[in-house]
Amino acid sequence: MKRWQGLFWMALLLAGCGAEEPVFETRFLAFGTLVDLSISGAPRAQAEAAATAIEQDFQTMHHLWHAWDPGPLGRVNRLLPSGERFAAPPSVLALIGLGQELSARSDGLFNPAIGGLVDLWGFHRDDPSQWTPPDDDRIQAFVQQLPSMADIETDGIFLRGANPRLKLDFGALGKGYGIDLAIEHLREMGIENAILNAGGDLRAIGSRGDRPWRIAIRRPAGAGALGIIAVSGDEAVFTSGDYERKFEHQGRRYHHIIDPRTGYPARGSLSVTVLHADATTADAAATALFIAGPDGWHALAARMGIRYVLLVDDQGAIQMTPAMAERIELLAHPGPVQISPPLPAAEAPRHP
Ligand code: AMP
Ligand code: MG
């Protein structure tokens, strides 16, 4: 009897709300994080086939772009410090080109050439007990000889490194570029409405039936959402936060987003959320603006052509652009909220 009553109420509820668009959902592990794929408005068999293909794409990209495993990027990382000219594997050339362009546009704050510094801090290891502050001497020696993406000379498929400390770590870009490639693949397979979400960083295309996708922005401290953003059409939402990888050592807190100017974790921000047309740019920009911090993010966002930015500073206060303020529905937030002057209308073009 109870069961029938339940069904009756559910039917009434559905009738009242208008039937929910069915969404196919699947989840897998890649890039060290959980990836959620939601597909709307496609027959189940088509969605399942697409999901299988996308999961394979992610496993392949993970292998191709891993900085510390002996795959193609591992090989590039062995050869770059030698200063010798070599033919690069095609699978990493595009990523290197994008890394060079975005690093230059971020004034070098986004710098995927500092894999050696990530090594020193131990953040490439999955075991948090191995994350520890290196000797200051070693950090200073690295920063004196700071490698940059401009130290990689490219000539067609040939590369030559001009700095013995070069080591590429695409931890701040690969997820974004991978999501862009996967979205392109989904479209080729006839999927027009989807969200591809890797650990809270995502790109959404189309809509969920006649409604936009609703995206929760993670609160930097603790669980729960800071706000909700409605996305329909095609847009990426990326957050860089100190909470992803952090540790305490002798009473001080350290995290994994490193300011290349100092060699130490960037100070002043807890998290930065960026909305942009593509995930590649959004990923690099969120990292760069996090490092630029509460005083520097606005000028850098203008330079990078990013319109939608929200930064939570280390006091818990929010700064955001007027464009972001129009889009985000903030949930209860105890700290102050400051709206910045508007940014120039010119937005960075869509990648890739
Ligand atoms: P994200 O979560 O996108 O901000 O990426 C953070 C990851 O990028 C770190 O775990 C490092 O592997 C790497 N990383 C740290 N600092 C930088 C930096 N200044 N530029 C580029 N990549 C960085
Ligand atoms: Mg990033």
Image (cartoon, rainbow, N blue to C red):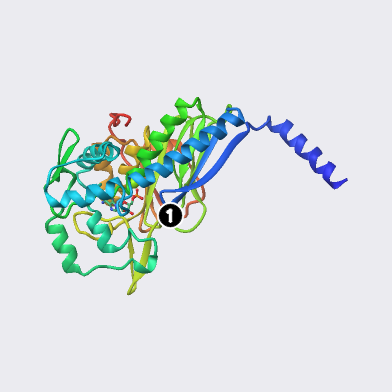
| Tally of numbered tags | 1
For the N terminus, which image quadrant?
Answer: top right
Q: Residue at x 38, y 39 (%)?
A: 178
Tell me: is circle 1 under 8 Å from ligand 1.
no
What amino acid is at disc 1?
A: Pro
Furthest residue in direction right, as rendered: 1
Q: Percent from the top left, x then y, of residue 283?
A: 34, 42
The answer, for residue 273, to whether it is visible in the render is no
Q: Residue at x 28, y 34 (%)?
A: 305
The answer, for residue 130, to whether it is visible in the render is yes
Q: Percent from the top left, x then y, of residue 49?
A: 54, 33
Q: Percent from the top left, x then y, of residue 51?
A: 52, 36
In the depicted view, which residue is nearer to us: 342 or 76? 76
Residue hosting label 1: 220
Q: Residue at x 46, y 27 (%)?
A: 187
Q: Residues within 10 Å of mark 1 (few under 14, many from 20)?
A: many
Query: Considering only vertical position in the picture, is 278 above or below 125?
Result: above
Q: Quadrant of residue 273?
A: top left
Furthest residue in direction bottom, as rendered: 250
Q: Percent from the top left, x then y, of residue 309?
A: 36, 41
Q: Element type at marker 1?
A: loop
Q: Quadrant of residue 260?
A: bottom left
In the depicted view, which residue is nearer to us: 256 or 116? 116
For the C terminus, which image quadrant?
Answer: top left
Q: Residue at x 29, y 31 (%)?
A: 348
Query: Considering only vertical position in the picture, is 133 above or below 193?
Result: below
In the depicted view, which residue is nearer to us: 307 or 116? 116
Left or right of 15 in this view: 219: left
